[in-house]
Amino acid sequence: MKGKITRKHIVEMADRLFYERGYEHTSLADIADSVQISKGNFYYHFKSKDEILAAVIELRLENTRNMLLQWEDGGERPEDRIKRFIDILIANQADIKMYGCPVGTLCTELSKLNHASKAEASELFTLFRTWLSRQFALLGLEAAADELAMHLLARSQGVATLAQAFQDERFIQHEVEQMNDWLNSKVNAK
Amino acid sequence: MKGKITRKHIVEMADRLFYERGYEHTSLADIADSVQISKGNFYYHFKSKDEILAAVIELRLENTRNMLLQWEDGGERPEDRIKRFIDILIANQADIKMYGCPVGTLCTELSKLNHASKAEASELFTLFRTWLSRQFALLGLEAAADELAMHLLARSQGVATLAQAFQDERFIQHEVEQMNDWLNSKVNAK
């Protein structure tokens, strides 16, 4: 049990370091230092940074799946669920201004590194894409559901990239309003 | 003269390597190898990767300034100039699918590294932002010009990030059409 808690703690610390500093720039020693356990205990759980990355992606996939399921359990209308997705930009704006989107920046970095885990990281986008697409279909927009999902994902990614470059919260808020207006126009045009 | 050509060649090769593999993942030795000149000649021009990065950003700023000036020289209407910006996504789609946007991915990486050159890299975005804003003002949309410029920059960034994650050219084309529709709606609503 204790071993499981330690392992999860390592993965969570690595997740945060990869997000804040980038995967390539974070060393195995950085992760071991941040966890503050003996080297022996650390290497018992993970032999390489690649192994930790695989576990980080797995943890993120699990957390994302749980979040999206929870958003569907609340009895809200599909448009309100989609608004929850848009609101991630507001809820996480402090982090986004500093480090960008955790999904987008990891996918971009692993893709440039041509890393073996790049396809697994892109699955994080696929989870959001499929979920958003299902909400648009529930709104009666089946034919364009996947296009609308990709459009909204792209808008949200672009806002994160520019919010990080310009450190601008007002820009995030303004774009979130525009995304909500766009969503309402789709709901009303049915 | 020959020294100047060699220096420019080093910077261009480094620019490409930073774009394809990321800044952190490209070593000084990788750059020296790609240029195929003697170590002595190489280190005569550059002592560190940071120095090369500064020169790469300077070169990109110069190329971007020249491109944007040229787009304003052609006697086109402002909306057609803005379409040239949107069309970058089509013209460079092969690279974007592989490596994302050269500006966005560099800014994101340097920001995570908290690199001394991150502000200079963000100037690349500022060049596009100021130029787009001027075109929207010329269209008679002065009051919202900067917001419209940031919106279009964000859309374009988001498309690049998702095109890279999903390797999808049809998605790029579809989003470019939508951006042109959006632009036309702004021009017609004046």
Image (cartoon, coloured by chain):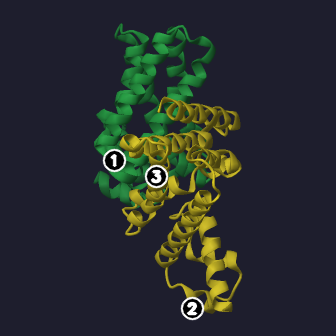
Chain colours: A green, B yellow
Q: Amino acid at mark 2?
A: Tyr
Marks 3/1: CA distance?
26 Å
> Chain for mark 3?
B
Q: In the image, A150: left or right of B174?
A: left
Residue positioned 36% across, 56% down in the render = A32
Residue marked by disc 2: B44
Q: Which mark is residue B134?
A: 3
Q: Which mark is residue A41?
A: none
Q: Nearer the viewer, mark 3 or mark 2?
A: 3
Residues indicated by labels 2 and 1 sit on the same polypeptide chain: no
As helix, strand or loop, the secondary structure at mark 1 comes to helix
> Chain for mark 1?
A
Q: Is residue A173 above or below residue B60?
A: above
Residue neighbourhood size for the residue with mark 2, other residues' Cα within 10 Å, grouped as few (<14), some (14–19), many (≥20) = few
Q: Amino acid at mark 3?
A: Arg
Q: Amino acid at mark 1?
A: Lys
As helix, strand or loop, the secondary structure at mark 2 comes to helix
Residue A103 image point, x, y percent = 47, 40
Disc 3 or 2, which lies upstream in sequence? 2
Q: Quadrant of residue B65?
A: bottom right
Residue positioned 54% across, 36% down in the render = B183
Q: Quadrant of residue A156?
A: top left
Residue A110 image point, x, y percent = 56, 49
Residue neighbourhood size for the residue with mark 3, other residues' Cα within 10 Å, grouped as few (<14), some (14–19), many (≥20) = some
Q: Are marks 3 and 1 in contact (CB under 8 Å)?
A: no
Q: Nearer the viewer, mark 3 or mark 1?
A: 3
Residue marked by disc 1: A97
